[in-house]
Structure formats: structure tokens, C-alpha cells
Amino acid sequence: MSDKTPYISFVVTSRNDNHGGDLRKRMMIFYKGLIHQCNKFKLPCELIMVDWNSPDQNELLDKVLPPVSASDYLSVRYVIVPPQIHNELRFSKSLGLYQMIAKNVGIRRANAEFVLCTNIDLLFSDALFEELAKRQLEQGKFYRANRCDIPATINENDSVEDQLKFCESNIIKRLGKISEYAVIYDEKGVLFKSTIFNPLLRFLTWLKPKMISPDEVKLRSMDSDACGDFTMMSKTDWERIDGYLELEMYSLHIDTMALYAAIAQGIEQVIYPREMCSYHIAHDGGWEPGNAVEQLQFYDKRPSLDWWVVEAAGRQIVSDKSNFDMNSKDWGLNNNNLEEITG
């Protein structure tokens, strides 16, 4: 490979704590899949793995994941955030990892022109990666892709091609808007479940923006479903919105606030078509407990944002064409000399 300059920085965070019961399996599937697709589509990228508050400093993630080779189109950098920094944050005893602050660490240190903030339990469809390999990303746009949940029974020993076939055939649930009908999309509505309604949907898609304000069109089109799994824009645009809000609480809804900030700054949303999706490996320990009592127990241990406050604040900055202006200039621990390990 003659030019190894990365086109996209994939930013993720993790720690070697077996989160969800099978973290190593999910992380290995993600890691090998990313290497495979970068090579298949000859797209130079870098993976920035932010190793946050590892419970075992002698077995960091670079010891868990195999090294890439010189011929691979993916380079890997591990950025180490030690427990000393984590312990300075509020609720550090009940929250082992501050996901959005960690992703900011990766954004600030990214070398590529474009930065995709994602997670370590995903596989990307070949259709999505083929689109990325066209190198047609633009500054001034942020990109969203549907998330399709798949069973945890995916075989980690299968080839990436076979894993992707498994994903295509075993979608449990889809999260995200249909790009063609984003303004009027309601995943529970019967209109979206049959192609017979497509002419009506196209008419409503044409009509609705003429009945509401331009800002309201953007807000109703905003695809916040599972946006922590796939939000991509230029590094310059990430810096325009000051990355994710560095609130010292559970990450729920903080990912959505980045979308509000992007829209407020005039950054245009692009939703990829349905086939250009990411596949999410189901696991325990996520933010969707099984019933209301479990939800109460979940939030009792994890201070979180209220959605109504998030929406009201988001709408306000979109109206004002402003930003949240809550992060320090050092967001992403930018003034900290963090250890880096090359994978």
C-alpha cells in the first residue's frame, strides 16, 4: 500500500472488563471485520481504541487484540486513560466508563479528515463500506446509518463473509429512519410496512416540508435512533460542535445532543439507505432493561439526562443557531499527555 494516510478515523472506547458477558467475542468480531473490510475495499483507515479506566493495567486492550500487519489498510492506536483521571470525575464509582468523554479523546487525536464515532460490537454491511470507499464524504455534512440488531449467537470463528451473511438473515430489530421518508417516518406506522403505500409516502414527503418551518423539517428528520453507534462527520465539524457534551453522567441522550449541535451549526444530515447499515451484536448490560422496575434500578445507579430537557435544549440551540457551550477548551482531555500504544 503506497499511501497509508487514513481517510476515516474509527473512534471507539472499551475496557477489558467483559461488559455484557461476552465483550471479547464482540470486540474481536468488530476488530477483524474492520480489518477485513478496509483491506477488501482498499480504504486506508485508522482505529482509535480509547482504553478507559482499565481494571487491569497489566492487561490492556492491546494485549487482548492481535496486531495488524504492515500490509493491512487499517492502522490501530490505543489511547490509555488511566484510573487516576477517571476517579476525578463525579460518580466514578458507579460508572466505570464515560463513553462520550472517551470518544472525545479519540476525536481530538484523530489523524483522518473524517471521524466516525461508533462502538466495538458492530459489523458494517459491505454496502456501507463500499460507499465509504468511494471517498465522497463532505465537510459540512454528518452521516447516519441504520442499526440492525442481530443475535449474540453469531459465530466468532466464521469468516467475515459468513458472519455478514448471518447478519443479513437474522435481523432482530432495525433502529433508524428510512432516508427516503425521514420527515414523516414512524417505525410503528403501517404505511411503512408495505410498498403499496410508497406513492402516498412520496406525496407526504413532498408536502410536509411545505407546511412546517425549515428548522422543524431538520428536527423532524433528525435520526437520533442509536446514533451513538454511527455518527460521522469531518474532524473540523466535530471541532465546530466541541465534540460530545462532557457531562459526568451516564451517556444516555448525550450522543443525540451532538446531532442537535450539528444541525444548529448548519451541518446537513445524510441518512444512508437501508442496505448501508451496521449490525449490532445483542448483549446484556445495555440501556434497555426488560421492564419498568428494572429501568428504575438501572437509572438509580447511573445518573442520567431527562429526554425532555435534552429535546428542549436542542431545539433552543437550533433556533438560536448556537452551541451548548458547556465543554472546556480542553475537551477530550486535550491537554493531557495520554499514553499511546500502536497496535
Image: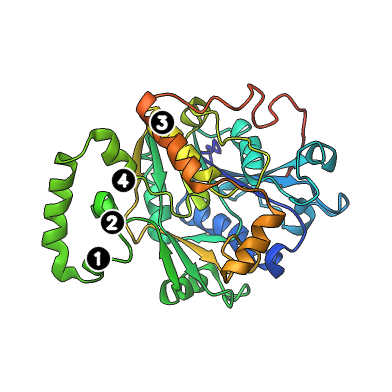
- Cα separation, mark 4 vs mark 3, equals 15 Å
Q: Label 1 neighbourhood size at 10 Å, few (<14), some (14-19), many (20+)?
A: some
Q: Residue at x 49, y 41 (%)?
A: 310
- Cα separation, mark 4 vs mark 1, equals 16 Å
- Disc 2 and disc 1 in contact, CB within 8 angstroms: yes
Kind of element beneath mark 1? helix
Q: Nearer the viewer, residue 67 or 237?
A: 237
Question: Which mark is in front, 4 or 3?
Answer: 3
Q: Earlier in the sequence, mark 2 or mark 1?
A: 2
Residue type at mark 3: give it.
Gln
Q: Is residue 24 visible?
A: yes
Instruction: Point out residue 37 in the picture as x, y percentages from the top left corner.
Output: 50, 57
Disc 2: which residue: 185
Disc 3: which residue: 316
Disc 1: which residue: 192
- Disc 4 and disc 2 in contact, CB within 8 angstroms: no
Left or right of residue 227: residue 252: right
Q: Residue at x 52, y 63 (%)?
A: 280
Instruction: Point out residue 335 in the picture as x, y percentages from the top left corner.
Output: 72, 24
Which of the image's four quarters has the N terminus? top right
Kind of element beneath mark 2? loop
Residue type at mark 4: give it.
Arg
Instruction: Point out residue 110 in the picture as x, y percentages from the top left corner.
Output: 59, 34
* Residue 301, image quadrant: bottom right
Residue type at mark 1: give it.
Phe
Q: Earlier in the sequence, mark 3 or mark 2?
A: 2
Question: Which mark is in front, 3 or 2?
Answer: 3
Q: Earlier in the sequence, mark 4 or mark 3?
A: 4
